[in-house]
Amino acid sequence: MFGEDHVQKIKNIPLSNSTVSRRIKDMSIDNEATRNEKIKKRLFFSIHVDESTDVSYLSILFVIARYLNVNKREENFLLCYPLTKRCTGEDIFNAIQDYFCENEMDWAKCCGVCTDGEKSMSSCYKGLRGRSKIVAPPVT
């Protein structure tokens, strides 16, 4: 695809597959830690939650965090999690709750939860909306 000159240059790079893989993983971990620190330092943030199904019929939970950073709105991809069980409001809430606990993020700082209106998300008792209201009453 690049030509013979580039192939030779790439072959001369002294990196094994495991080294490249490890460096990519290290960069990913650093990127996630930096993003989570930014979110934790904010007075408040909101999340956008979407559950989707990929081509192999696996349910995937996407969570995007939105917050103000120096008077500018930022949004970052927070979580991509496969839902291997059912896709109930409790399962969705537990996946987000586990991520928040693991990364020491505070539900009390979450001022809003945006969803697509699906019943498992928007139900005021058993959905994500109802469960998030229990741990963070001011959330809208």
Image (cartoon, rainbow, N blue to C red):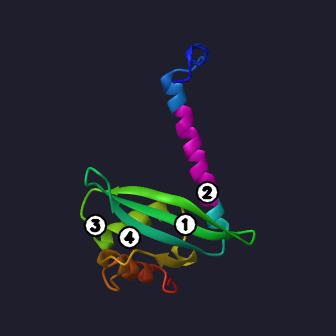
Q: Check the image and report above or below for 83 versus 15.
A: below
Residue at the location (28% across, 66% down)? 87
Q: Amino acid at mark 2?
A: Arg
Residue 24 highlighted magenta (yes or no): yes
Q: Which mark identifies residue 52?
A: none
- Can I make out residue 123 in this image? yes
CA–CA distance in space, label 1 to label 2: 10 Å
101 relative position to 131: left or right: right
The boundaries of the magenta stretch are: 22-37
Q: Quadrant of residue 8?
A: top right
Residue 106, by quadrant, is bottom right
Residue 42 x %, y %: 66, 70
Q: Residue 109 lies in magenta, yes or no? A: no
- What residue is shown at x 51% (from left), y 64% (from top)? 64
Q: Is residue 50 above or below residue 6?
A: below
> Which residue in the structure is indicated by mark 4?
93
Q: Find numbered disc 2 in the image and state the secondary structure of the residue it sits on.
A: helix
